Image: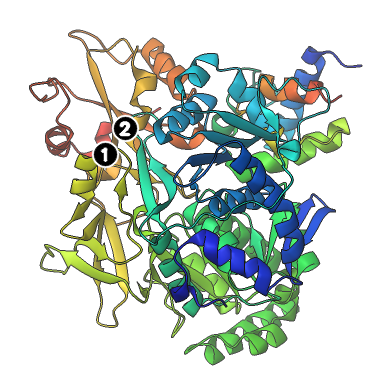
Amino acid sequence: MLDLSHYSSIGEALRDALETYAPEICLIEADRDRETHRFTYREFKRRALPLARGLQDAGFGAGDRAAIIMTNQSKWLISAYAIFFRGGVLVPLDYKLTPGEHWQLLQHSGASVLITEYPIWRQLQADTAGRAAASKLRHILVTEAPANADLAGAHRWEEFNAPGKPDFVRRARKDTACIVYSSGTGGRPKGCMMTHENYLEQCVALTSLYPFWPGVRYLSILPTNHAIDFMVGFFGPFTCGATVVHLRTLRPEYVRDAFSKYKITYVSLVPLVLKNLQKSLQARFEALPSGKRKMFDALVRINKAFTRERPVLSLSRALLKQVHAAFGGELRAIIVGGAFSEPETLQFFYDLGIPVANGYGLTEAGTAITVNDLKPFRADTVGKPLPGMELRIVAPDAEGVGEVSVRSKTVMSGYLNEPELTAEAIVDGWLMTGDLGRLDHEGHLHLLGRKKNMIVTEEGKNIYPEDIESVFESLPVKEFCVFAANYIWPKRSMVGEQLVLVLHLDSGQTLTDELRRAIAERNNRLLNYKRVHGVVLFEEDFPRTASLKIKRNVLAERLARLDRAAAVLPL
Amino acid sequence: MRTLEQTTAEVLQLASTHFKVPAGSLSPEDDFFKKLGIDSLQALEMLTRLENHFGIELPDYEVQGVSDFRTLASRIQSRL
């Protein structure tokens, strides 16, 4: 691995990685069962530098912002490299957002360059008002456009090259490297300004526990715009000479095949996918004939006995050969993140000899705060703080439960254009996470609910009620408000979180079928993971500030007097 | 060549069989995540079945953001 303490920026470290590991394979890309690309670090450089020169000739340089809206593929990483080479600030956006949300974030970020894929651009260009609002956008690069496609003023990515060597632009450790949106597509966008130092430090900490080296193959499934995949599916493996494998489809059958085809070493998954994997494995085990099942259970018991203190991969692979063969035979760990994982699922995989690197983090803290170090494996916690991460519990109650706060070189410098929000989030150098937890005697963190009004889905999506309220705006009721149910009725759990729509009906109005239909019709306009799951009827006026904003905390306190089970009416 | 109406009817039929909901209880405007109670992974499985049925390849990105049967059927129709 490169010694990252010597580097001042992501671009500088990546530039050296491409030289150091020149003959190693850095990228494999497959579309279903067809391998479409395989690049060495040398070939990656050959493809990236002409793009960097193209950006340079277009006037793109130090501190300029470039957004990427792409699915996981080689051009994502090539583009990011070119942006960093030119000293630019990368704005990685979630390709699953709607065109309206994309344009809003493009405008908010002040991006002058957008790099996207043709199917996404086809939807984006149809929103002419959105495009007009993103006034700083100068150049749009579109990948894989059909030969006869009308690109509406955009350039073909494949042709946006220029001859000649591009000039490398130096950046300082404290300069912004990326603007990463942790929320705020409907309300107030929260663009986390992540510095080069944030990434360099986080990379050192994470790879000290889960190392990469030439020959390691990381299967990139989580979107690369997500902090986890950006770190362990790009920056981490590249600075260690490892290989990243991209799949252009996430159909389970092709993902399954990829494990054995590419001998995957690490993969990152969200809890939902991990749980599905558990269910399908359990179904297969249950279908075994009785004799084989007994033998299998005995082997699992032996494996558990020998891996109590630490993983013993060689033994687990020998004992449970068929299970490990299904994962390619070389899997060292599944990294799970983005949301809370149930201990039972984590234990299931560990008992099979497949360690799950569960942890806890948030974008604002620079990916991970705590990670299970497997010394020994603990399914009941989210692990210990990473090296370099100071963690404290603020205002703990009698059981030691309080708000988790962290101080580290990996914490963002602030929210873009939001000094007030930044001051609320970072107090005296400590990032207030809004999550509740306690530390046990071994230094492991237990998460026990949230202090903030938001939910995280099992797919790893952060949903803030304020961001989805606009869809209910024309609802024929006196007033309404969306809440995370656990914010109103605190529960010491991080699973099964749901949003509820609180309605204050007009005098004499009732929750008729017609009103239910009106709610459902609006709810269905939201992406499925953003929808509310129930309605709460409240008979008082909502408390409001002088400027008529709802006092959410006061309203939540009043709603808490209602019995949750009776108050939440299913939709 | 199928019409869009035929394609839509076949999509509904296949979804009702695969997810074991009564035939006729699904309509083109329905949100399939909600009506079938499925998550994004199950939706991908449904796509694979639809591809096999219609003999086409439907890239994941083509159905990005699609959640109702009618739009899904129109994306399939454009590849027939």
Decide if residue A507 is on the left or right side of residue A235.
left
The quadrant holding residue B16 is top right
Image coordinates of residue A552 in percent, x first then y, are 18, 33
- Residue at far left of view: A546
**Foreground of the two, B43 or A436:** A436
Image coordinates of residue A488 in percent, x first then y, are 21, 41
Q: Earlier in the sequence, mark 2 or mark 1?
A: 2
Mark sitting on residue B21: none
Q: Marks 2 and 1, Cα distance to the nearest angstrom? A: 9 Å
**Foreground of the two, B35 or A121:** A121
Query: Do residues under tags 2 and 1 come within 8 Å of each other at their CB atoms?
Result: yes
Image coordinates of residue A251 in percent, x first then y, are 71, 48
Decide if residue B47 is on the left or right side of residue A340.
right
Q: Nearer the viewer, mark 2 or mark 1?
A: 1
The verdict on a common chain for dots 2 and 1 is yes
* Callout 2 crowding tier (Cα within 10 Å): few <14, some 14–19, many ≥20: few
Is A231 rendered above or below residue A223?
below
The residue under label 2 is A188
Q: Which residue occupies 44% across, 19% down? A: A522
The residue under label 1 is A418
* Callout 1 crowding tier (Cα within 10 Å): few <14, some 14–19, many ≥20: some
What amino acid is labelled 1 in the image? Glu
